[in-house]
Image (cartoon, rainbow, N blue to C red):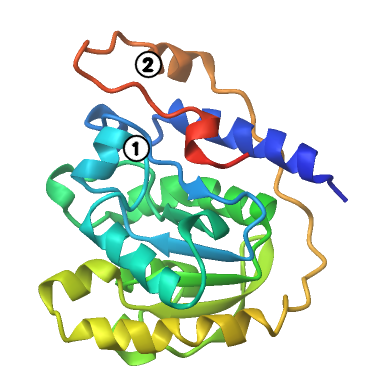
């Protein structure tokens, strides 16, 4: 059984590994890796699709209009951003905000699963189609199953999985805000149920050091105009 301090050190290692990742071509066009941010001991975790332009620039998830709506909905149920952990299925922005490709999702899966193991959330809200389909392992779309909680084993952890629409969808379809609000209002009662029984499985191996070729690629000179990546304290992880 790891202590909270040990889990945080391992999470820092995963963060550093993600910053040096060149497992898919998205590393060639990213400004920053968007690892995730929030409470490292959060009971509630939100998983979105991929970073957008603002997130890529700042190295933080959900910092645009969708993030503001997410924070507003959290406030309505007595929570704030610092109470939860927020991340995406992809840690790098797809060019032009296109949809993630399967090989990109597969390349990033290890980071998401490590976050699940180390943060140990009780509940995960998947935001939109890509996160919902990836974590459920099924092609059923968000419009059919939003607001329907279920117990699922995802990688190393069993959680209450709660699919809801992505806040960005409500920016384009204002009537969807009420649907989101209705689904959000159920979050406190679902959290009150406590954690599901965990499977007896081997833990995910601790993050390996970045291989030397990857280290060299990650160390290429950065243009002066490129923002510095956020450190662990800015991410609010630890």
Q: Where is residue 2 in the image (x, y as percent from the top left)?
A: 84, 46
Foreground of the two, 39 or 218: 39
Left or right: residue 28 compared with residue 120: left
Q: Earlier in the sequence, mark 2 or mark 1?
A: 1
Left or right: residue 95 compared with residue 164: left
Q: In this view, does 75 lie above or below 233?
A: below
Residue at the spot 39% in from the left edge and 18% down from the top edge: 218
What residue is shown with label 1?
24
What residue is shown with label 2?
217
Q: Position of residue 171 (x, y in %)?
A: 16, 70
Residue at the spot 52% in from the left edge and 54% down from the top edge: 82
Residue at the spot 25% in from the left edge and 34% down from the top edge: 57
Figure label count: 2
Mark 1 lies on a secondary structure that is loop
Q: Residues within 10 Å of mark 1 (few under 14, many from 20)?
A: some
Q: Position of residue 211 (x, y in %)?
A: 54, 20
């Amino acid at each position: 059984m790891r202590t909270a301090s040990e889990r945080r050190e391992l999470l820092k290692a995963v963060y550093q590994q993600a910053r040096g990742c060149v497992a898919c071509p998205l590393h060639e066009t990213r400004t920053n890796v968007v690892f995730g941010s929030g409470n490292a001991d959060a009971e509630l975790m939100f998983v979105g699709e991929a970073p957008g332009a603002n997130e890529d620039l700042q190295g933080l998830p959900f910092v645009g209009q969708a993030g503001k709506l997410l924070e507003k909905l959290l406030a309505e149920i007595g929570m704030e951003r610092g109470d939860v952990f927020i991340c995406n299925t992809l840690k790098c922005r797809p060019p032009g905000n296109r949809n993630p490709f399967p090989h990109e999702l597969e390349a990033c899966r290890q980071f998401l699963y490590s976050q699940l193991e180390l943060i140990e959330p009780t509940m995960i809200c998947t935001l939109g189609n890509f996160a919902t389909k990836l974590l459920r392992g099924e092609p059923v779309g968000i419009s059919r199953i939003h607001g329907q909680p279920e117990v699922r084993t995802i990688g190393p952890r069993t959680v209450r999985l709660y699919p809801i629409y992505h806040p960005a969808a409500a920016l384009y379809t204002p009537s969807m805000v009420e649907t989101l609000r209705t689904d959000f209002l159920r979050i406190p009662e679902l959290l009150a149920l406590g954690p599901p029984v965990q499977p007896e499985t081997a833990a995910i191996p601790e993050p390996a050091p970045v291989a030397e070729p990857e280290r060299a690629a990650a160390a290429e000179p950065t243009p002066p105009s490129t923002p510095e990546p956020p450190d662990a304290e800015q991410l609010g992880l630890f």
